[in-house]
Amino acid sequence: MNKPNKLGFLEVEVQEEGFPENSLSQFINANKVFCFSLFLFLCFLISTLVSIAISLLVTPAPAPSTKAVMLLSNSLNEIKSEQTQLIQNYQEFKQEQLLVKQELNSDNVTALKHILMDQEQNFQLFLQSLKQGMQSLSGDLPNGDKWYQDYSEQINLAEKHSFRRHTLLSMIQTDTYQQD
């Protein structure tokens, strides 16, 4: 006995005994419009997929735009000019720093020279007052003359060295001092 198919839109009736060998041809004959539509849809789908695959394989990579290349070139040129300017500024700064350092060192040396010369003069004045104090003290002490002579020789030697240091300091020329 024949039953209608549960799908509803197909007009083929299913036989209870099984499918005979020519059931496919019967299905196609009974549903020609549906089968033709399905065939066209599958052809369209396959052709579209093949076209997409070929276009992806064959299409070359897009070349960078001229505008983008020009922007990058301009940016690169600006960076190079900034780098050159920074290097030039750095070199000028280093030269100025060396000049200032030399001036400061020259000023410092001159100041140090004057400080040392003043110290030597003060030391000489101290030694002279010490010598006068020892002389007045030696008159008040027993055997003070011998004590005064012993220490007076040492003070004279210290004064001599101080005069020599003062002379050497005055010979130093600080105006032309340059540090390498």
Image (cartoon, rainbow, N blue to C red):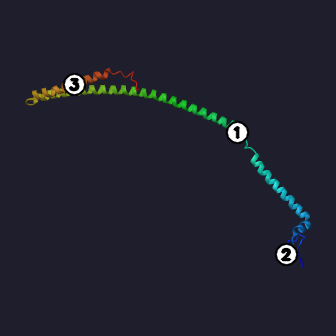
Query: Is disc 1 in contact with disc 2, using a CB cutoff of under 8 Å?
Result: no
Q: Residue at x 22, y 23 (%)?
A: 160
The first of marks 3 and 2 along the sequence is 2
In the image, is 72 to the left or to the right of 6?
left
Q: Residue at x 23, y 28 (%)?
A: 126
In the image, is 90 to the left or to the right of 168?
right
Reading the image, the residue beneath label 2 is 18
Mark 3 surroundings: few (<14), some (14-19) or many (≥20) residues within 10 A? many
Describe the element under mark 3 as helix, strand or loop.
Answer: helix
Is 52 located above or below residue 176 in the figure?
below
Q: Position of residue 76 (x, y in %)?
A: 63, 35
The first of marks 3 and 1 along the sequence is 1
Reading the image, the residue beneath label 3 is 159
Type of amino acid under label 2: Gly
Q: Nearer the viewer, mark 3 or mark 2?
A: 2
Q: Position of residue 16 (x, y in %)?
A: 86, 77
Type of amino acid under label 3: Glu
Q: CA distance from mark 3 to mark 1?
A: 84 Å
In the image, is 122 to the left or to the right of 81?
left
Residue 71 falls in image quadrant: top right
Towards the viewer: 102 or 18: 18
Reading the image, the residue beneath label 1 is 68
Q: Residue at x 43, y 29 (%)?
A: 101
